[in-house]
Structure formats: structure tokens, C-alpha cells
Amino acid sequence: MRKPSMFSKDYKSELKKRRRKISLLIILPIIGLTIFLVTDFNALLNKGAGIKKSINSVLLNKSKDKEEKAVEVEKKPEVVKPVVNSEKTKVPQKEVALKSEIFVANLSDGQKISVEFNVAAGEKSIKGVSDTEGITYDISPSKKSIVIQSKNNQQLMYVNVDKTSKDITKKTYESSKGEILTKEGILENHKNYNWSVMPKFIDEDNIAYISELPWINEKAQQYIWKVNLKTNVHMQVKPASGKNIEFKKIATKGLETNVDGNVVYVTATGEAIE
């Protein structure tokens, strides 16, 4: 800014103007700086207050959450799960209705045998006989058939779940000399003779029994025979004989049999194996 000339007639007036301008140049920046500083400081204060408010809000919310959770825990009782006994909690299966049926088998000597059947869900199985007097019997592994032996005349009767029966007795025997021997004739002349006794299933298609055939003498030697239910063919099981033969249970090898204290297995093919 140019300094006024002291020789000017308006020197004093120009000097005042100059001083005024200088004052303005000094004051205006100060005022502006003051306004700027005040404005930024207020903004900073406001910003700080906002941050503080946000922090307080977050803390307050967390505190409320903790209080609410604490209240919820207090209100919600602890649920104790009972110990489950799997045996007691099993859902009982629907019981299958079990029915009984009777089939009367007529033996050749006039004796009537009541064979009992169990019927469940359309399936039949043989339970046994209602009266065992004068007979012996054995039920097949599948319980679908039964063999009955009359102690009176040593007849063998086969009965299945279809309520059909058939006589599977060996009626005659041809000797090595060609002589035909009948069951009735032998039992009539030899009261204690074993023609066909103690029948036992080997499997579903074959039945073993004890006989003194092929000999008819006083030695009373016992032999094992078998009959095939499909062919009705009887054959002697070899080699197996003794004074005392007893059938046991069906095993993997065949029908377990005790012959004079020795164990052999009778197979469906008609062999006695160890």
C-alpha cells in the first residue's frame, strides 16, 4: 500500500484512510481466523459429543442386553432331561393275533391223533399233538410237517400244514433169498420186534427211523433206516448198527445219532459219518 505524501493537501485524510485500511487488513484475518477456529472447535466438540453419545449408547445397549439375558436365565428354568431306559421306552409292536386249529389224523389201527396248528398272519406252523398216549412224534425243522409213529402197530404217518396226511410206513421187506416179509406178519410172530420206531427228521424231505431189519432173530441188533418223503423210497443207512441207537439233534453234518455211545451223523443221502 502506497504511503501518502506529506506535502499533499489531503495528507491527513489519506493517512487516516491508510491507517483504516491497514487496520482492516490486520483485523479481518484475525476475525476470519477466529471464526474458523470457533467453527471448527464447535464442530470438533459436536463430533466428540456424537462419538461419546455413540459410545454411551453402545455401552448402554450392551448393559441392557446383559440385564435382559440375566432376566431370561432367571425366568427360564433349567430343563433336566430324564435318563431314558431304552428297554422301557420301546414302542410295543402290534401283537399278532394267534389262532389255533386242529387236524385229526386217522391211523390204520383206528386211533385218532389231533394235530395242533398255530396260525398267525396267515402263516401256519405245527405246535404238536394234543394227546401223546400210544404214539411218538417229531416236528420238522420248519415246523411245517410232523411224523407220527403208532406204538401199537409201528405205522409211520406224515402230516403237513396243508392238513394232508400220508402213510409212509415200509410195508414189506424182501430177504436176500427173495422171501417177502410183511410188517403185520413179523409183528404178529415177534411181539417185541422193532420194524419202524422213533422217527426223526434229517431235513424237510428225509426222515430216519430205527429198525431191526434186515435181520429177524433174537439178537435184537438195531439199524438205521431212512425214507425220502418225495419218492417214498426206504433205504438202510450204512454203516451203522448197535444194541442201543438214539437220535439227537440236527447238526451241520446231519442228524446227530448216538450208537452204543459213539456219535455219528446221518445224512440225507443215507450215510452215517463221523
Image (cartoon, grey):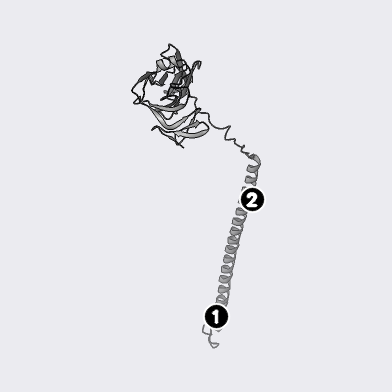
Pointer 1: what residue? 18
Crowd band around label 1 with a 10 angstrom C-alpha radius: few (<14), some (14–19), many (20+): some
Q: Is residue 9 above or below residue 236?
A: below
**Residue 191, percent from left and from top:** 47, 16
Q: Is residue 103 above or below residue 225?
A: above
Residue extending farthest to the top is: 110
Q: Amino acid at mark 1?
A: Arg
Number of numbered discs present?
2
From where the camera sits, is residue 103 visible? Answer: no
**Residue 9, percent from left and from top:** 53, 85
Residue extending farthest to the bottom is: 7
**Residue 195, percent from left and from top:** 43, 21
Name which quarter of the figure residue 33 lies in: bottom right
Q: Amino acid at mark 2?
A: Ser
At 58% from the left and 64% from the top, the residue drawn is 44
**Residue 241, percent from left and from top:** 46, 30
Of residues 214 and 219, the one nearer the viewer is 219
Pointer 2: what residue? 63
Position of residue 264 in the picture relative to residue 56 (left or right): left
From where the camera sits, is residue 51 visible? Answer: yes
Give me the C-alpha separation between circle 1 and circle 2: 66 Å
Do the CB atoms of the residues marked 1 and 2 lie less than 8 Å apart?
no
Q: Secondary structure at mark 1?
A: helix
Which of the marked residues, 1 or 2, is nearer the chain's N terminus?
1
At 61% from the left and 51% from the top, the residue drawn is 62
Name which quarter of the figure residue 72 lies in: top right
Residue extending farthest to the right is: 74
